[in-house]
Image (tube, rainbow, N blue to C red):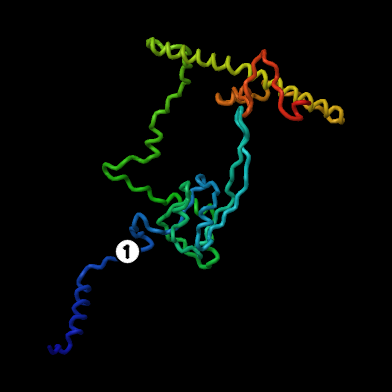
Amino acid sequence: MARIPGEGLAKGLAVTMRHMLRKSETQQYPEVHPDLPARSRGVIALVEENCTVCMLCARECPDWCIYIDSHKETLPAPEGGRPRARNVLDRFAIDFSLCMYCGICIEVCPFDALFWSPEFEYAEYDIRDLLHEKDRLGEWAATVPPPPAHEVGAESPKELSAGSRPAPARRTAPPAPVKGPAEGASVAQETAQKATQDTARETARDTAPHAVRDTGRDTGRDTGRDTGREAAGRPAEPAKGPESRPRREPPRAMRDIRSIRPPGSLPRNAGSPPQKKDGPEGER
């Protein structure tokens, strides 16, 4: 399709005539300040009371434009306690000529010491004057808008719910268990307990002679060692009694090992004379 000559000029003049007949909307700045969004990034404000000099904001800043100085101060100890040391903030400065307004320092602050303020009127004639100290940053903290209200039906903040929670009751020590048969115990249970006690007594009675033998053998061995050491001029070690080194009870199969006769030997009667062996051994 062929274009009409002068069509573009007519459209441009139409836009111009439309704005000439419409009322202009001009904001008389600086007398009238603009309405900025609630989360606009104007400048970073500091709440000095909340700062604990943790240095997280200075370490996470990608431009290294935050400068912090501090010193330690010892607080007096309460009654029955010991003094505590805390960090005191001496300097907190931000160089806005380097800042790129990323907001990382505000996000990583764990104690809510840094906030965004909608203020933007801090231009300077010299770029070196854009380094602002904590006094100026504290003045901007008054212009920080309050946080928006929670949505209808939303959960309450954890801080409020934790503060309104009642204190937990103190736990008392449980009563000591009463020794002896429980109330209402059946006769079968009592009979089983007595049988267990009788079995333990018989086991201790059977193992008593062996314990006495082993104790005497160990005592004689230790006494011989101490006598040899005293003769050699070494200090003698204290004798170990039966209570200092308990003996492990041998198994049932090993208790009667002394009564086993060697292979090939015949049982000998008490009244029979000893048998003579054939050969030269018997003549001896």
Indicate whether 193 appears above or below 283. above
Residue found at the very far front of the displayed protein:
279
State the image quarter where residue 219 is shown: top right
State the image quarter where residue 240 is shown: top right
Front residue of this view, candidates 22 and 72? 72
Residue bearing the label numbered 1: 27
Find numbered disc 1 in the image and state the secondary structure of the residue it sits on: loop
Which amino acid lies under the numbered mark 1 shown in the image of this protein?
A: Gln
Indicate whether 157 appears above or below 256. below
Which residue is drawn at the image coordinates 59% and 18% (left, top)? 207
Indicate whether 257 appears above or below 116. above
Location of the N terminus (image quadrant):
bottom left
Residue 44 in view of the camera: yes
Measured as percent of width and height from the top left, residue 142 is found at 44, 49
Measured as percent of width and height from the top left, residue 117 is found at 42, 54
Count every numbered label the image shows and give the total. Answer: 1
Residue 140 in view of the camera: no
Which residue is drawn at the image coordinates 62% and 47% (left, top)? 71
Front residue of this view, candidates 18 and 138? 138
154 to the left or right of 90 = left
Residue found at the very far left of the displayed protein:
1
102 to the left or right of 246 = left
Which residue is drawn at the image coordinates 54% and 49% (left, top)? 54
Location of the C terminus (image quadrant):
top right
Which residue is drawn at the image coordinates 37% and 36% (left, top)? 161
Measured as percent of width and height from the top left, residue 223 is found at 78, 23
Front residue of this view, candidates 57 and 98? 57
Measured as percent of width and height from the top left, residue 139 is found at 48, 51
Task: Tell me if mark 1 has few (under 14), some (14-19) or many (20+) residues whose alpha carbon lies within 10 angstroms of its own.
Answer: few
